[in-house]
């Protein structure tokens, strides 16, 4: 038998085997392929260095363990940010946007992510409490994604001020395509006039995925820190949100984080707020 030829039956068998292996490989690859997702953590970390020896490491653990692609943090003090950026995993995972060589932080609002930064906008609300919001324009999978975070006016009576602040941010985001808006909105579900100024073309991840769960992130029954920081007659409320407007990125999951006490007294939490960890899944 020639070394350069094989009996026809052997050739057929080899072709069948090759086709079978290719089919199995294709099925295996499809089975192992993970859908593309974006994870987002929004968290008001409490602008205080009180008990920071316990609180800050707890916050850093939550941030690290979240494996979030995008961080939207509020009430970030310089000391907190300095210590966050010294965490060994931070520089390996996140791009920290800068403006004129300085950290891009607006009235304590801070965004960082795994993705390339195109540009940064600061929204000056010119409000009684000097509030600002920040918008970071990212490039994700070669496509632009605008990410905004806020810490709106805080007094219970400030609904009209917050409504104007929402208009400020949504107005900026009207000029872009896909947009994510997450942060501390400082008003609960149904409160007016604030709620009427939430743009209707945004999906509220919590309401979409857990419509029967109140989702309190300011929970005065569960957190002594929230109770001590609340206004007179203030109820527990869902004041932190993840909103998304996109045909590509759709809400897939969302959970509350930081809702466990970190000391034996049961009264100390990472922050007076609970955070939100959300996952967006690519539509195709």
Image: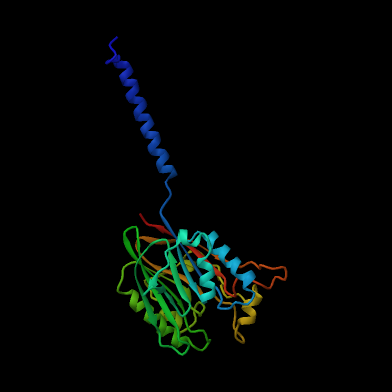
Residue drawn at (49%, 62%), measured in percent from left and top?
Answer: 90
Residue 267 percent coordinates (x, y): 68, 73
Q: How many marks?
A: 0
Residue at point 59%, 83% (across, down): 234
* Residue found at x 32% / y 16%: 9
Decide which of 256, 190 is in the foreground and name it: 256
Say whether residue 207 is visible. yes
Can you say whether 3 is above or below 104 in the image? above
Query: Residue 248: x percent and y percent?
Result: 35, 60
* Residue that protrudes farthest toward the front in the picture: 101
- Left or right placement of residue 7 versus residue 150 in this view: left
Residue nearer the viewer, 89 or 10:
89
Residue at x 52% of width, y 87% of height: 155
As drawn, 246 above or below 134: above
Q: Position of residue 260 (x, y in %)?
A: 64, 66
Quadrant of the image containing the C terminus = bottom left
Left or right of 2: which side holds 230? right
Residue 211 in sight from this viewpoint = no
Percent coordinates x, y for residue 38 in the rendering: 43, 60
């Amino acid at each position: 038998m020639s070394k350069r030829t094989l009996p026809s039956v052997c050739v057929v068998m080899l072709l069948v085997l090759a086709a079978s292996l290719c089919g199995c490989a294709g099925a295996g690859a499809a089975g192992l392929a993970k859908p593309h997702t974006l994870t987002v953590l929004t968290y008001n970390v409490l602008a205080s260095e009180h008990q920071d020896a316990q609180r800050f490491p707890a916050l850093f653990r939550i941030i690290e363990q979240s494996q979030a692609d995008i961080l939207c943090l509020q009430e970030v003090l310089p000391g907190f940010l300095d210590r966050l950026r010294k965490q060994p995993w931070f520089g390996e995972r996140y791009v920290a946007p800068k403006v004129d060589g300085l950290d891009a932080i607006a009235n304590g609002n801070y965004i960082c992510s795994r993705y390339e930064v195109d540009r940064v906008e600061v929204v000056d609300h010119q409000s009684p409490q000097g509030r600002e919001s920040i918008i970071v324009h990212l490039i994700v999978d070669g496509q632009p994604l605008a990410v905004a975070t806020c810490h709106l006016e805080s007094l219970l009576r400030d609904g009209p001020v917050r409504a104007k602040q929402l208009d400020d941010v949504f107005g900026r985001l009207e000029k872009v395509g896909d947009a994510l808006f997450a942060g501390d909105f400082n008003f609960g579900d149904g409160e007016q006039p604030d709620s009427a100024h939430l743009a209707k073309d945004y999906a509220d991840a919590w309401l979409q995925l857990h419509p029967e769960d109140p989702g309190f992130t300011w929970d005065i029954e569960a957190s002594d820190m929230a109770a001590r920081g609340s206004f007179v007659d203030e109820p527990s409320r869902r004041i932190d949100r993840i909103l998304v407007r996109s045909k590509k990125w759709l809400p897939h999951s969302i959970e509350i984080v930081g809702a466990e006490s970190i000391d034996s007294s049961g009264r100390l939490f990472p922050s007076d707020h609970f955070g939100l960890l959300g996952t967006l899944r690519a539509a195709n």
